[in-house]
Amino acid sequence: MSVDLGTGTVDRDRGFPRDPFNPIDGTPDHDRTRAARRKGPALLLSLLSLATAACGAESAESADAPVAAPPVVVAPTVALSLNAAEAVTGAPATLTWTSTNANSCTATGAWSGSRDAAGSGSVTAGSPGSHTYTLTCTGAGGSASASATLLVNAVAASSPLPGSGAWRPPYGLYVGNPHGNDATAMALFQSRWDASVRQLRRQPQFFGTFTDFSKDWKEWAGNASWFAWSFNKSERVAGMKPVIGIKLSTNAYWNRQNDAFREIISGKHDQVYRDVVAAWRDNGYKELRFRISYEFNGNFMPDNFGKDAETLNLWKQAFAHVADVLHDVPGVKVLVVWNPANINWNGNSVIGSYPGDEYVDVISSDIYSTMYPLSLVDWSNGPKAANLLEWSKNPVNRIHYWDFPGATEWTARGSGWGMVQALEFALARRKPFAISETGVGGDNVKTGPADDPEFPAYLGARLADFVRRGGTVDHVVIWDYDASDGKWRFTDVPAKSATAAAWTRFVNP
């Protein structure tokens, strides 16, 4: 195709002007030139029309062709919540979170590190105040954050209860047993008792004592009678209620406790148990608490509940049998105490050992300040401690151990038996709760501080909260005595002055 511009024709096939004086199709030059001049403008308009039509067709084709939609990018979402709005120092709380459209999540604020897109975890605040936990999750659509705030209150000896002022624990003392036939020993008992009462500034309502299980069955009644008489002779416990430990075997049954349990179930020792109750009754005591097989979940006791189903079942039957025998003694009120110990591991299920509400009047747990953690994980979210001494210097770690002695980095509650489990179980069974033995006495190296005012404060806070939730505390027996298994004496001990002051605050909040 060519276009005549009036002075020459541009040949579009060759790309150069045609020469009007050198025709190639036989048309005279002047005719060709006139014809081109006449037709030029009309031809140009025709060509422009054709070009416009072609462009319109291409536009129509483009409009009809399918166009791929751009990818939809969705922004991530995050939800974060706490199982409690408030807690006391050292008490764990549980964070739960979910997210959508996220590839990664990061914790900031009162916690740190990367997190899965969804999950839950235990957090423990080591200081009073507001602690905010934030989780930020990122995906192709950007980032999103959520926060949850925990109000942490300081551990106090106790908290005021609505309408009743400050809660005061019904407490008892153990300063050893008096010796009614030895004037020197009796004077020592009396002086220790008097000093403890002066330190604690309030008369106790209970005193702790035991039936000597190192003796043969036939000697138990005489031993009980002698203790009851000696306590009376001390002139220190008039009107008070004894909390008496009594076992389901003697020391002769170590590693064969099932034999003792079978003997008890058969009724062979019924009269022994009746005579023990009668010995205390006949010495003037009208209300007795018996801790049957106390600390039975520890393998350091000859009548422990073992680690197999047969031993556990026999233990429960023996406990129930003795409870019935004790309850049936006339002329005295007997309360049966089911009394495991706070411990980091159990051979059998502690809850599974519960013999039934009809056999138990009080649920108790023995707890001391000493610690034997299974892991040195730092419960204030710090680095793992190098040794137990370093770990135990953090009160948050000690509090978590008292709550959950079997806790590890893999399970915040653990498989042991701790204060939280004991209190929760008492609430669930609607039974009064007690601490039948407690004391402070670490070694400053392997078992925690020797002088630890945090421990009495911790007990006060946990018990006050238990009462606030509707529970009843039956008794707390404080050990102010140095025994073979620990130095628990705090009265007139300069190295434990902070502990002594803390116990005073516990008794008199």
Image: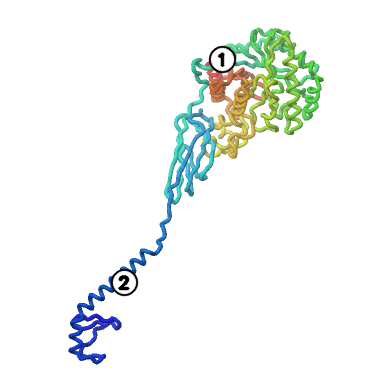
- Residue 431 is tagged as none
Q: Is residue 166 left or right of residue 259?
A: left
Q: Is residue 367 visible?
A: no
Residues at discs 1 and 2 in contact (Cβ within 8 Å): no
SS type, badge 1: helix
Display colour scheme: rainbow
Q: Secondary structure at mark 2?
A: helix
Find residue 424 and report its horizontal and vertical position in percent. Answer: 60, 27
State which quarter of the image contains the N terminus: bottom left
Q: Label 1, label 2: how many angstroms apart (C-alpha)?
A: 107 Å
Q: Could you tell whether 163 is left or right of 335 in the image?
A: left
The answer to whether residue 334 is above or below residue 60 is above
Percent position (x, y) of residue 343? 65, 30
Number of residue marks:
2
Residue identifier under label 2: 54
Nearer to us of marks 1 and 2 is 2
Density class for disc 1 (Cα within 10 Å; few <14, some 14-19, many ≥20) is many
Viewer-proximal residue, 185 or 353?
Answer: 353
Q: Amino acid at mark 2?
A: Ala
| Label 2: how many Cα within 10 Å (few below 14, some 14–19, many 20+) | few
Q: Amino acid at mark 1?
A: Leu
Query: Relative to 185, does residue 388 appear above or below in the rendering?
Result: below
Q: Residue at x 46, y 42 (%)?
A: 78
Tell me residue 143's x, y (percent).
Answer: 43, 46
Asked where in the image residue 244 lies, by quadrant, the reply is: top right
The disc, 1 or 2, on the residue closer to the chain's N-terminal end is 2
Residue beneath label 1, please? 200
Is residue 210 shown to the viewer in this render? yes
Which residue is rendered at x = 61% and y = 31% of the image?
405
